[in-house]
Image: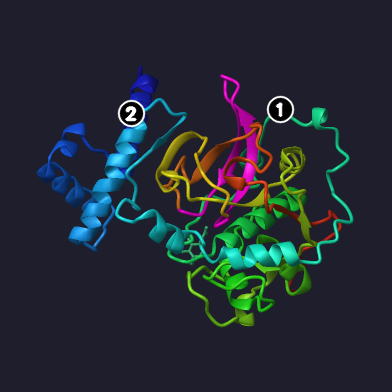
């Protein structure tokens, strides 16, 4: 009896906290201008949005109707009115993803990419586990927030370094995106102005390694590179390996062994408002965002998907993650996610640096 009461109590607490975090509305509110106005005020309050204008309200209304219509359809994923509801898609991508990535996409293609080896290429696909979730293997830190800064590439790459470091050493350490933003002068990344995921791994190999977030914390703007922030512990890696472009099996082989950095098109209608379920698009082929594959699985109904970690905070999607459909007859993958993918190499012999 006591245990039952406690269970009910804990469950209601979870429910109350859950509701407190997400913004809900009543269908009635959408039916009149007054209703929408009231909803806009409640939403501003809920997400502590100080900006307010007739233009913003118009954008909000359009987004809310779009989200509501989407959720009425029988789609495999739902959207929600989240903190981005007063931004247009273009504004959102310019602010939280990376429209400047096109420059880096050119750079990626023009690199001297000697595909000398593929760590997992020879593996028989039938020997891979049916599902993998690196979160269950203590190899994924909680989703972070890039803020209003085009640093998605750094979050994807640092997530991959955190993953391979945890897999090799058994220790999960939250590492520093800011160090990359401040210290990489190779031209492969540019602070809040975008960059290449693969550039981060190579930079770390050729320089000092990667410091912890605790010693080199995230501030979300490019600052001066400060050696005094490197701290007494640096994760050392062996650089980058590209996955074969437009090859789902290559992604599966790699993701079975470690998290994989990907680049993709976040411009599908509703992507910015993704709430839960398996994302199936529609979306395009314009690479403007980077994320991290942290696993793969299959629904009871047979739909196969990737588990992908994003950097828009834990309030976005499924606690900061999105499940994206795989197994489609589509060589570039959903939202072109098989176009520009990389793993971070770290051999078991590559030891981290500890200052005495
Ligand atoms: C990283 O450092 C910043 C600044 O100290 C802090 O706000 C943030 O919570 C840290 N991130 C993580 C994931 O620990």
Residue at 45% of width from left, 63% of height from top? 94
Q: Position of residue 197 (x, y in %)?
A: 66, 61
Residue 289, above or below 278: below
Left or right? Give the position of 222 relative to 235: left
Mark 1 / mark 2, whichever is N-terminal: 2
The quadrant holding residue 317 is top left
Q: Is residue 198 left or right of residue 44?
A: right
Q: Which residues are magenta?
A: 287-312
- Single out the residue that lies furthest toward the top: 1
**Toward the viewer: 246 or 77?**
246
Task: Say if disc 2 is inside 8 Å of ligand 1.
Answer: no
The quadrant where residue 340 appears: bottom right
One can see residue 195 in this view: no
Give the quadrant of the C terminus: bottom right
Real-space CA distance between mark 1 and mark 2, rounded to the nearest whole angstrom? 33 Å
**Residue plotted at (35% across, 32% down):** 71
**Is 17 rendered above or below residue 292?**
above
Residue at 74% x, 49% y is 245
Residue that carries the numbered disc 1 in the rendered image: 130
* Residue 332 location (% of width, % of height): 66, 43
* Depth order, front residue of 102/261: 102
Would you say residue 289 sits in the magenta stretch? yes
334, above or below 341, in the image = above
Report x, y in % for residue 7.
Answer: 38, 25
Whether residues under marks 1 and 2 lie with C-beta atoms below 8 angstroms apart, the answer is no
- Of the 4 image quadrants, the one containing the N terminus is top left
């Amino acid at each position: 009896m006591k245990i039952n009461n406690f269970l009910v109590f804990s469950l209601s607490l979870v429910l109350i906290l859950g509701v407190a975090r997400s913004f809900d509305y009543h269908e009635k509110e959408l039916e009149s201008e007054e209703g929408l106005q009231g909803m806009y005020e409640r939403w501003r309050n809920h997400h502590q949005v100080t900006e307010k204008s007739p233009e913003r309200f118009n954008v909000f209304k359009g987004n809310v109707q779009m989200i509501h219509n989407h959720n009425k359809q029988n789609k495999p994923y739902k959207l929600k009115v989240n903190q981005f509801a007063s931004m247009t898609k273009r504004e959102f991508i310019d602010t939280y993803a990376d429209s400047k990535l096109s420059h880096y996409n050119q750079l990626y293609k023009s690199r001297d990419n000697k595909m000398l080896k593929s760590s997992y290429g020879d593996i028989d696909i039938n020997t891979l586990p049916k599902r993998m979730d690196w979160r269950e293997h203590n190899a994924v830190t909680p989703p972070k927030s890039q803020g209003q800064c085009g640093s998605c590439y750094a979050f994807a790459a640092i997530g991959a370094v955190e993953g391979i470091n945890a897999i090799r050493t058994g220790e999960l350490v939250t590492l520093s995106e800011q160090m990359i933003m401040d210290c990489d002068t190779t031209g492969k990344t540019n602070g809040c102005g975008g960059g290449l995921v693969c550039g981060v791994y190579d930079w770390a190999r050729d320089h000092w390694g990667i410091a912890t977030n605790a010693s080199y914390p995230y501030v979300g703007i490019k600052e001066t590179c400060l050696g005094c922030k490197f701290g007494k512990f640096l994760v050392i890696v062996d650089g980058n390996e590209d996955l074969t472009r437009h090859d789902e099996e290559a992604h599966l082989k790699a993701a079975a062994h470690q998290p994989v950095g990907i680049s993709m098109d976040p411009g599908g209608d509703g992507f910015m408002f993704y709430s839960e379920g398996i994302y199936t698009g529609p979306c395009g082929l314009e690479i403007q965002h980077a994320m991290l594959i942290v696993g793969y699985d299959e629904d009871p109904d047979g739909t196969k998907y990737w588990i992908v970690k994003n950097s828009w905070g834990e309030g976005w999607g499924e606690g900061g993650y999105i499940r994206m459909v795989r197994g489609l007859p589509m060589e570039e993958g959903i939202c072109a996610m098989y176009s520009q993918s990389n793993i971070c190499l770290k051999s078991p012999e590559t030891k981290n640096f500890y200052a005495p």
